[in-house]
């Protein structure tokens, strides 16, 4: 049995957080409904997340008191806490694969992209810029033929058998024929974005770079133009920052540094109808951020 509190009985900060929580949960509810996931299963994941967060917050506490402490923090009974602690969490879908690593390398190396930063068509074999050499640069544990076959299956690349060349199907590297991996990207990308935002809010500043630009009062025609602009920005980010990050990785390896950190950098856009019309003087696009400069 859990404690049920009315939002009206909470402090103003808690009420504000609940209002935001509805924004965060609405798209997840839509996804769950689309795939037939009942609310009971989603609630189970919410309970598990609360217990995990409370456990991390209680690091160093006497293990004998941990269950009671988590119960107090979360509002769950000690029996419920013990049950969830004893059960294993579902395995997360894999997002990083040889296929995605090959695509990333393809889009960040100068010999594999054109002047616009787009991946070029390359021969399947050969000693120069070929798919065979590309795959071997990423891993030597899997044969290039196997990698190519899997990427074709996922709809990521096309193999022109007549000319024996390989080309990227879509500049947006999403494995459209692999549902678990597609939804896994939601957890990885959106999850890290949300963690960055939460860290910034809880620690009062720029723990992570997290900013957004909002432009409203746009037409449908302008949105189409903006889509091309955003895609161009992503290509620039990928082709310019990718090699620089690879250089840092190479330097860490050469200097024998401890390599136990990771960094995720993303760019997203979302278009929707304006909810309200704000009257007042016109101004530039608005910058929204959790980062305090």
Image (cartoon, grey):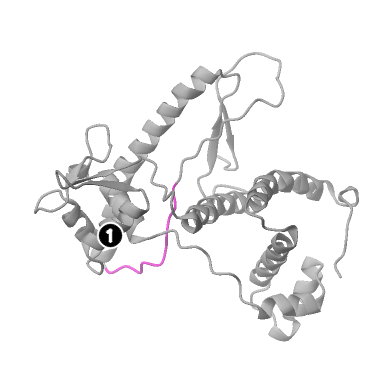
Main SS class of the magenta portion in the image: loop
Give how far across and how far down residue 54 sits, in percent: 70, 68
Give how far across and how far down residue 64 sits, in percent: 73, 86
**Where does the C terminus fall, quadrant-wise?**
top right
Relative horizontal placement of residue 132, taking residue 214 as reference (left or right): left
Give how far across and how far down residue 194 sits, in percent: 59, 51
The residue sitting at the bottom extreme is 64
Give how far across and how far down residue 280 sits, in percent: 69, 14
60 and 138: which is toward the camera: 138
Residue 264 belongs to magenta span = yes
Q: Is residue 85 above or below residue 212?
A: below
The residue sitting at the top extreme is 281
Residue under the image location 50 percent in, 51 percent down: 189
Residue 16 belongs to magenta span = no
Residue under the image location 29 percent in, 62 percent down: 252
Report which residue position mark 1 lands on.
147
Q: How many marks?
A: 1
Element at label 1: helix
Residue under the image location 41 percent in, 27 percent down: 229
Q: Is residue 214 above or below residue 185?
A: above
Judge the density around disc 1: few (<14), some (14-19), many (≥20) Cα neighbours within 10 Å. some
Relative horizontal placement of residue 235, taking residue 266 as reference (left or right): left
Relative horizontal placement of residue 237, taking residue 108 as reference (left or right): right
Relative horizontal placement of residue 184, taking residue 56 as reference (left or right): left
The residue sitting at the front extreme is 162
Residue 240 in which image quadrant: top left
53 and 229: which is toward the camera: 229
Q: Which residues are magenta?
A: 256-265
The residue sitting at the left extreme is 127
């Amino acid at each position: 049995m859990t404690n049920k509190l009315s939002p009206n009985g909470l402090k103003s900060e808690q009420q504000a957080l609940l209002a935001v929580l509805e924004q965060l949960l609405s798209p997840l509810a839509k996804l769950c409904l689309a795939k037939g996931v009942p609310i009971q299963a989603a609630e189970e994941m919410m309970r598990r997340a609360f217990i995990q967060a409370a456990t991390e917050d209680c690091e160093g506490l006497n293990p004998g008191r941990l269950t009671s402490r988590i119960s107090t923090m979360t509002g769950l009974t000690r029996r419920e806490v013990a049950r969830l602690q004893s059960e294993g969490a579902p395995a997360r879908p894999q997002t990083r694969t040889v296929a995605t690593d090959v695509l990333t390398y393809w889009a960040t190396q100068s010999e594999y992209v054109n002047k616009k930063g787009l991946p070029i068509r390359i021969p399947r074999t050969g000693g120069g810029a070929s798919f065979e050499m590309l795959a071997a640069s990423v891993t030597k544990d899997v044969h290039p033929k196997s990698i190519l076959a899997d990427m074709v299956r996922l709809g990521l690349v096309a193999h022109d058998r007549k000319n024996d060349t390989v080309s990227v199907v879509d500049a947006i590297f999403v494995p459209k024929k692999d549902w678990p991996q597609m939804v896994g990207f939601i957890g990885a990308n959106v999850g890290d974005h949300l963690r960055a935002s939460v860290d910034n809010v809880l620690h009062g500043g720029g723990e992570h770079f997290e900013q957004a630009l909002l432009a409203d009062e746009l037409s449908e025609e302008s949105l189409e133009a903006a889509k091309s602009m955003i895609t161009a920005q992503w290509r620039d980010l990928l082709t310019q920052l990718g090699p620089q990050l690879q250089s840092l990785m190479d330097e860490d390896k050469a200097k024998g540094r401890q390599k136990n950190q990771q960094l995720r950098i993303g760019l997203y856009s979302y278009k929707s109808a304006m909810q309200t019309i704000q009257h007042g003087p016109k101004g530039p696009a608005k910058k929204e951020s959790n980062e305090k400069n």
